[in-house]
Each structure stands twice: as structure tokens, then as C-alpha cells.
């Protein structure tokens, strides 16, 4: 059997926090060739540690150790240490909230400050005594997704003296009520620069965690705080990606390359992704091309030079955002790094939102107080075995068509596969979905299917 040339993962069990008054496991990835007497090693701190490494946690997983093994072996990343900190389970939402209590926590707690003190005052000294990790913020990143993305963003701006690099994947920035669709920001709008480099991304099929909220944050960092687009802050919109570990596994390599890789590598590829039709009533849409750097870092190029015909079909807003003008097909051209990409965009007559009516029928009636969600949107029981919902949603929002009754309790088809019928909501539609059976969240197998919103986003694992 060939020798394992990859990194080694050590687990520190039941690490206690005095500040939080709880315990959790911490998993530490040591790179190939790790030398206890060497270093200091760059370090990335990751949240939701249960799902970071495939070797130490359940599926679904980010499989970060596989990404690190590959990129370090290729010489694209320096040997670095990755610290995956398990979440606080029932306290996860509270611990990842600094400014606004986690909206679905009935205790209305914000324990982000205490979690911050746990990381910086308790866990960091503990690990520094055991491993040769750097104390240089220029080589220290904090990274997470969803609520983990939110807390990474806050930690990096609150403590740039510790975390000089930030990876913010699919961040939970705004709570959208699954019934009324009322929006409550849960992130703090920064007034001064913080970390030196930031990666931010979002999938186009993440339901109520919308592209718009993430793009607004990116634009704020660039326009108001002066971060250089495509260099200091790098953004990626993955149009078909759901809110799921499998999507973050595909993008975490690009995030790490931006944070720890060579920023001077050239673009080697530029493409214009396919986009759903946009309506004249939409305030703005993104037309950023996708660039691939020489090391494989893939991102949306915000600083590309854009042109289109007819000239009056779109109005430029900056950073690869435009306002639709008159209806009809639009030919787009983007130029960046000596490369040119072409694509098309269809503009249709219509408002900023569109109607969605959904009827969910079940093979057996559910208890009267059982909640049923359609892509994170709460339906109402109207009869035995029948749940319905009607919403006006922003055009372009991506829904996977998943049906669920809570965390990892997914609706299944007749052949036992998860119900999925993804689409971008680009016009009025009425749907009926039948659910013959449900998964048992307590009997989850390692081959967990993708899910974005079978429970209200942001969910608590």
C-alpha cells in the first residue's frame, strides 16, 4: 500500500471555553512535511468544524484536507495549518452573532463577542503552545460559510490585528422572514478598513440568502472602504450553486488561493456565464465575467471593461452591475487581463418581483403543527395532506425546489431521491409538488443529498 503523502489531522477533544462555559472538539490539519521545530506556519481558522474535514466528520463535508493536500503538493499554497473549530450545536446561531441576535433563537442571544474571546484568548494560545502557528495577521485567515461566513466577516473587521485575511462564503447577512419576506440585516456595516484581503462568494441557487445582499456588501467594501476589486477583495458568484457543503467544497480552493496564494498571477481564461432573463423593473443585475487565474483561482471579475449592444439596452452602475433598459436581446463583451469574453442577456418587460404559488401534497397527513418548507419558504396547512404558499419573490432568485420539514428532513420522490426541481424565478409561476416520503434526519447516511432550503435558512445543524 502506498504511503500517505497528505497532511495529518489531529483532534483535540472536549476543549473547554471558560468564556462560553462549554466544550467542543477542535481538528487541526498539519501539512505534508510538517515539522514541529519548523514554522511559523500560516494558519486558517474555520468554523463549523464538524463539516470541514471528511476524515474527521460526517457528510456532507467541505473536504478541506483534500483541497489543501492538492494545492500544497502543486506548490500553489504554502504549507499551512488549518484549525477547524466545531460549532456549539444548539448555541451555534448565538455564538456566530455579534450584533443582532440569531433570528431563530427564542433566547435572543448574541454570543459572538464571547466566541471571539474564546478563539483569541483561549484557543489561540492553547494551539500556539502545541503547534508553531504564526502570530502574523498577514498570514492568518478566518473562514466560514453561512452563519460561519457572517462571524468570519465580523471577526476580521473587529480583530484585524489577529485575522488579517477573511474568507466569507455564502454569508448569512440578512434574515428574510420565510412568511412575510421582511428583511432584517444581521451584519454590521463597517466604517473603516479591516483585513488586508477578503474573499466573498455566493451561489445563485441559495434561496433567501440572496446574491443581492452579498453584492451590496462587496460594493460597500469597494466603493465606501476603498478595497481594490479583484485584488484586495475578490468576489465570486456561482450561478447554479446551492447553499450546501458540496458547493463550498468546490469554491474553498479559490478562497484559499486568494488569501494565501500569489496575487500577481495573471488571468488565463475569461468567460461570460449564462444568465436568466432580467426584467426592465429590476434595479440592477450583475454581468461580471468569470476569470480563472494561472493557479486556478476562479472568480467574478468586477473590474472588467464592459460593452454591449444596443447601447441603450443597459445602464452602467459600476463594478459589473447594470440596470436593464428596454426589452430585447443584448450582446455583451467583457475584457480583462488581455482576454475577451462574449455573451448574451435577454431583457424582458416586467417588474422587480414575480408571483410564486406552490401547493405541496403529502402521501400521509402530517400533524397539524408540522411545518413544511418549499425552498426555505414556509407553507400553510390548508387541508389534510395539503400545504400551500403564495409569495412575490425578487426576479432572478434561485430556488432548488427542495421540500422539507426541518433540518435534514427532506421530501423524497417515489424512487427515494430528494425532490429537486431547480429554477431561477424569472416570472409568475404556479407549482404542485407531491411528497411520497421523507428522509429520517436521525438515520442520515454518509451519502447525504444536496440541500439548500429544506429548513428555513439559516439552519442550525
Image: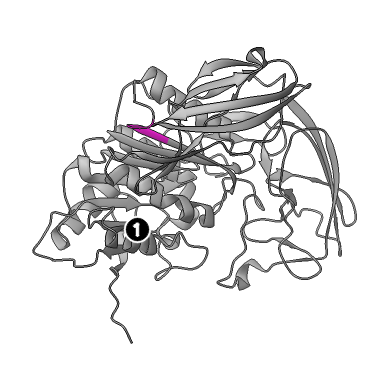
Q: Can residue 231 be seen in this view?
A: yes
307 relative position to 326: left or right = left
Residue under label 1, please give it. Answer: 84
Instruction: Looking at this view, name the residue that lies furthest to the top.
Output: 312
241 relative to 318 in the view: left or right: right
The residue closer to the viewer here, 215 or 142, is 215
Q: Can residue 461 be seen in this view?
A: no
At x 78% / y 71%, what residue is drawn? 415
- Residue placed most toward the observer, 262 or 46: 262
Tell me where residue 80 sits by quadrant.
bottom left
Residue placed at 39% from the left, 49% from the top? 296
Q: Nearer the viewer, residue 426 or 408?
A: 426
Q: What range is drawn magenta here? A: 230-234
Scheme of image coloration: one colour
Q: In this view, does 249 lie above or below 2?
A: above
Q: Does the magenta stretch include residue 316?
A: no
Q: In this view, does 56 lie above or below 342?
A: below
Dominant SS in magenta: loop
Residue 104, percent across and down?
Answer: 58, 43
Amino acid at each position: 500500500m502506498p504511503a500517505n503523502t497528505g497532511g495529518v489531522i489531529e483532534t483535540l477533544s472536549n476543549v473547554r471555553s471558560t468564556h462560553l462555559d462549554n466544550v467542543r472538539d477542535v481538528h487541526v490539519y498539519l501539512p505534508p512535511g510538517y515539522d514541529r521545530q519548523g514554522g511559523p506556519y500560516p494558519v486558517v481558522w474555520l468554523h463549523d468544524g464538524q463539516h470541514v474535514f471528511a476524515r474527521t466528520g460526517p457528510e456532507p463535508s467541505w473536504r478541506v484536507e483534500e483541497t489543501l493536500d492538492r494545492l500544497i503538493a502543486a506548490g500553489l499554497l504554502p504549507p499551512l495549518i488549518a484549525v477547524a473549530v466545531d460549532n456549539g450545536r444548539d448555541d451555534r446561531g448565538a455564538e456566530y452573532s455579534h450584533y443582532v441576535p440569531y433570528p431563530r433563537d427564542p433566547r435572543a442571544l448574541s454570543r459572538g463577542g464571547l466566541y471571539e474571546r474564546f478563539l483569541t484568548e483561549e484557543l489561540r494560545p492553547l494551539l500556539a503552545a502545541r503547534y508553531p502557528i504564526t502570530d502574523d495577521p498577514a498570514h492568518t485567515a478566518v473562514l466560514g460559510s453561512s452563519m460561519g461566513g457572517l462571524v468570519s466577516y465580523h471577526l476580521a473587521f473587529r480583530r484585524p490585528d489577529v485575522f488579517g485575511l477573511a474568507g466569507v462564503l455564502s454569508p448569512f447577512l440578512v434574515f428574510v422572514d420565510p412568511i412575510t419576506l421582511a428583511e432584517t440585516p444581521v451584519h454590521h456595516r463597517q466604517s473603516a478598513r479591516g483585513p488586508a484581503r477578503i474573499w466573498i462568494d455566493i451561489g445563485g441557487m441559495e434561496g433567501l440568502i440572496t446574491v443581492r445582499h452579498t453584492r451590496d456588501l462587496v460594493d460597500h467594501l469597494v466603493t465606501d472602504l476603498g478595497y481594490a476589486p479583484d485584488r484586495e477583495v475578490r468576489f465570486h458568484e456561482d450561478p447554479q450553486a446551492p447553499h450546501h457543503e458540496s458547493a463550498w467544497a468546490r469554491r474553498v480552493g479559490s478562497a484559499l488561493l486568494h488569501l494565501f496564494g500569489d496575487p500577481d498571477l495573471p488571468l488565463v481564461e475569461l468567460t461570460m456565464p449564462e444568465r436568466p432573463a432580467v426584467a426592465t423593473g429590476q434595479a440592477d443585475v450583475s454581468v461580471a465575467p468569470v476569470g480563472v487565474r494561472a493557479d486556478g483561482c476562479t472568480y467574478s471579475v468586477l473590474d472588467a471593461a464592459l460593452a454591449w449592444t444596443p447601447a441603450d439596452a443597459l445602464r452602467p452602475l459600476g463594478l459589473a452591475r447594470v440596470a436593464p433598459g428596454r426589452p430585447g436581446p443584448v450582446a455583451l463583451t467583457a475584457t480583462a487581463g488581455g482576454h475577451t469574453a462574449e455573451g448574451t442577456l435577454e431583457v424582458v418587460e416586467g417588474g422587480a418581483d414575480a408571483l410564486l404559488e406552490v401547493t405541496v401534497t403529502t402521501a400521509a397527513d402530517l400533524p397539524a403543527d408540522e411545518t413544511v418548507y418549499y425552498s426555505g419558504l414556509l407553507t400553510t396547512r390548508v387541508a389534510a395532506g395539503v400545504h400551500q404558499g403564495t409569495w412575490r419573490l425578487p426576479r432572478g432568485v434561485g430556488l432548488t425546489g427542495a421540500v422539507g420539514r426541518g433540518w435534514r428532513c427532506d421530501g423524497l420522490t417515489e424512487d427515494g431521491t430528494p425532490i429537486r426541481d431547480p429554477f431561477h424565478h424569472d416570472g409568475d409561476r404556479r407549482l404542485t409538488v407531491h411528497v411520497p416520503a421523507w428522509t429520517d434526519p436521525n438515520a442520515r447516511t454518509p451519502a447525504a443529498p444536496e440541500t439548500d432550503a429544506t429548513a428555513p435558512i439559516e439552519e442550525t445543524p
